[in-house]
Amino acid sequence: MGVKGPVAAHPARPRASERSRRPARSAHEKPVSGRMGAQPPRYVIALNPYPHERYTKCPRCAVLTRARKLPLVIHVEGVGLFVLRKSCRLCPTCEMVIVHQAELEPLIVASFPSIGAPGGRLDYLILGTIDLQHWRRGLAGGSSIEQLTAHMSDFKTGVTLEVSPGGWGPTRPRQ
């Protein structure tokens, strides 16, 4: 199988308008497969498991993050879907939402006391976000699964955050 069309001897350099400021996707980013929401995917999600790391700068592009309250659609094992409006860190450049696990899990346990076992592991999945108007309508009278998925945006990808400890260390491994 060949390539049709003329073959350039030297690859053309992309124009300034075609170049992206965002770095290429790293190896530990996983694309989210199968969509649940009817709206186009909107953000990149990162669940921060480190309670002492606050991520005031984006781990991808090093731009200052901003605090935003987003209505998150969460599936909890044994309960089902529910929507929680939660303060998160948002990078406006690469649209990464950083949710702090140490803040999220107590809110889930407070919402559903029957699932909160002391020292037990919560089994939940953050699926996406919904628009604010539908979240407000849902507070007044509830909404069905069909209405929720019609106004829901899935996440583009999920990112695993890793922290490397700072400080001095050997420049090369000892033999």
Image (cartoon, rainbow, N blue to C red):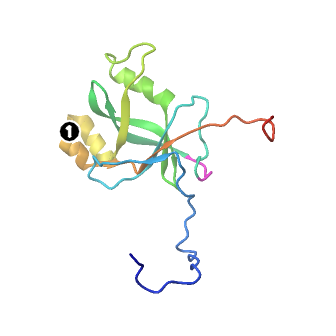
Is 168 part of what is drawn in magenta? no
Q: Which residue is mark 1?
A: 143
Q: Could you say which quadrant of the image residue 3 lies in? A: bottom left
Residue at the (23%, 49%) spot, across then down: 150
Where 175 falls versus 16 (above or below)? above
Residue at the (60%, 42%) spot, across then down: 56
Is most of the magenta stretch helix, strand or loop?
Answer: loop
On the image, the x and y values in percent for residue 30 come to: 45, 47
Judge left or right: residue 79 versus residue 124.
Answer: left
Where 61 falls versus 12 (above or below)? above
On the image, the x and y values in percent for residue 128 come to: 36, 44
Residue at the (49%, 48%) spot, across then down: 96
Question: Between residues 171 and 118, which one lies in front from this camera angle?
Answer: 171
Judge left or right: residue 7 versus residue 116.
Answer: right
Q: Amino acid at mark 1?
A: Ser
Is 63 part of what is drawn in magenta? yes
Q: Could you say which quadrant of the image residue 50 lies in? A: top right
Badge 1 local density, few (<14 within 10 Å), some, or many (20+)? Answer: few
| Furthest-front residue in this view | 1
* Span shown in magenta: 61-65
Which quarter of the rendered picture does the N terminus lie within? bottom left
Where 113 falls versus 174 (above or below)? above
Judge left or right: residue 50 versus residue 111.
Answer: right
Secondary element at tag 1: loop
